[in-house]
Amino acid sequence: MTKPILIFLHVPKTGGVTMRRIMEKQYRKKELLRITPHFPANGINQLSIREQRKVKAMYGHFPYGIHTRFHRPTTYMTFIRHPFQRVVSLYNYICSRSQNPAHIPVKKISFAEFIDDPRFQVPLQNHQVRLISGDLRKFSLGEAMDHLQRHFSVVGITDLYPESLEVMKQRYGWRDVNYTRENKSVERVRKQDVPDRLRRLIIQRNQLDLELYRHCREELINQHRVLT
């Protein structure tokens, strides 16, 4: 029986670049499909039947739903992060990456201004629920939870990275999952220095992501407990 294609839905600033490097050790080049600006999602439709048959896994920044482009069974995996930590990390990342499209405007403003800037509210408010719902504008926690239950085989947790990898290694039959942390941002703002007022505001605006994170964290802990 053919194994389903493993789709890694990479939520920004959740440890996804590290996971990409781990996946690159598990699959041959022709077996791993990379969705990038140079090969967008619609490129899947241009693959020949023979090329599609070779694909065993794929990764990239895209919302839920890309599996409909394949004519084979698929399963998703992803990583979820506490929303406060993810928002701080996103700001630091943009500020430290000159190639990022938002680098120039974000570098000129403070963290407090960043979280209130209307230009960046989609990635700053419940972005994880948006991506897993499959629509950045019309989304709900219930829809995201339903997709997780029906189509995701493992959901890793960023602050439980080693435990997540142990579950994934067992689930997908991976070999070497040793890693070096990749894509670490220079800290312009340290989490411990963020005022309580801003911390509460971020949490208030990310209640759906927080509930998703808590649910997935508990699930991951239970899955890891079975292994040990």
Image: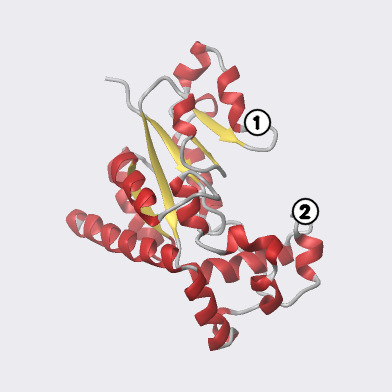
The answer to whether any part of residue 185 appears in the image is no
In the rendered image, the quadrant that contains the N terminus is top left
* Residue type marked 1: Phe
Taking depth in this image into account, of 31 and 113 the one nearest to the observer is: 113
Q: What colour scheme was applied to this rendering of the protein?
A: secondary structure
Near mark 2 (Cα within 10 A), the count class, few <14, some 14-19 or many ≥20, is few
Q: Tell me the distance, in whole angstroms, between the alpha carbons under discs 2 and 1.
A: 18 Å
Residue highlighted by disc 2? 99
Residue 30 visible in the picture: yes
In the rendered image, residue 227, in percent from the top left (x then y), is placed at 20, 54
Above or below — where is 196 with respect to 112?
Answer: below
The residue where tag 1 is placed is 39
Helix, strand or loop at disc 1?
Answer: loop
Query: Taking 15 as reference, is 205 above or below it?
Result: below
Residue 171: numbered disc? none
Q: Secondary structure at mark 2?
A: loop
